[in-house]
Amino acid sequence: MSFFSTRGGACVTASQAVLWGLARDGGLYVPSMFQKLSQERITALSAMTYQERAERVLRNFMEDYSIAELADSVNHAYQSPAFSDPAIAPLKKLDAGVYMLELFHGPTLAFKDMALKLLPYLLTLAAKKNDEKREVSILVATSGDTGKAALEGFRDVPGTSCTVF
């Protein structure tokens, strides 16, 4: 699957979109298509662990990453003790027909942990796939919980560094 810029730029691979972040024309990268999920597929996904579900969903978008690379990235990102609940993002029933998805079990208790724990693994793989030899360095300017979540996500991931302003 390719990704294209919201401003009409050229298509790129998933690893290029991850590595570059923003399109050269200033647009955002979006997938060239979204698959419709059948009720059977949704039911099957709901029975999986968070890690299995994440890997399966990523497979649909990250075609230039191997299944083994995605599984390894997901398993490194979403493991204990980084997440306080083994379900990672448990779905809790509050009342009849009312549920809450708990996105606060990551290291900083922020929902941003969900993405920022996985990003460094996808980024380092993207760098290798695109023959980028330099360390992956992330600069974060924030006034909130994004900075701490980014620091935690990139902590102890070889080939990366993160600086928060």
Image (tube, grey):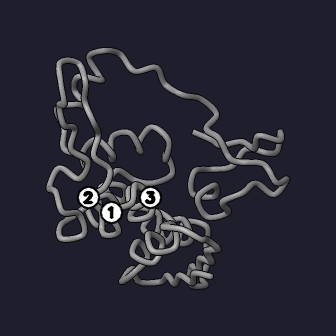
Above or below for 54 versus 20: above
- Residue behind mark 1: 109
The kind of secondary structure element at disc 1 is loop
- Residue behind mark 2: 105
For label 3, the crowd category at 10 Å Cα-Cα, with few meaning under 14, some 14 to 19 and many 20 or more, is: some
Residue 64: assigned label: none
Q: Alpha carbon of mark 2 to alpha carbon of mark 3: how far?
A: 11 Å
* Marks 1,2: beta carbons within 8 A: yes
Q: Residue at x 63, y 41 (%)?
A: 2
Q: Residue at x 46, y 20 (%)?
A: 36
* Marks 2,3: beta carbons within 8 A: no
Amino acid carrying mark 1 in the image: Leu
- Residue behind mark 3: 112
Q: Alpha carbon of mark 1 to alpha carbon of mark 2: how far?
A: 6 Å
Amino acid carrying mark 3 in the image: Lys
The kind of secondary structure element at disc 2 is loop
Q: Alpha carbon of mark 1 to alpha carbon of mark 3: how far?
A: 8 Å
Front-lying residue, 136 or 79: 79
Front-lying residue, 2 or 101: 101
Q: Quadrant of the N terminus?
A: top right
Q: Residue at x 39, y 79 (%)?
A: 157
Task: Return the x and y of residue 142 as percentages of the image width and height.
Answer: 61, 71
Query: 42 left or right of 21?
Result: left
Task: Return the x and y of residue 120 as percentages of the image width and height.
Answer: 46, 69
Report the mark closest to the observer, 1 or 3.
Answer: 1
* Marks 1,3: beta carbons within 8 A: no
Q: Residue at x 29, y 22 (%)?
A: 41
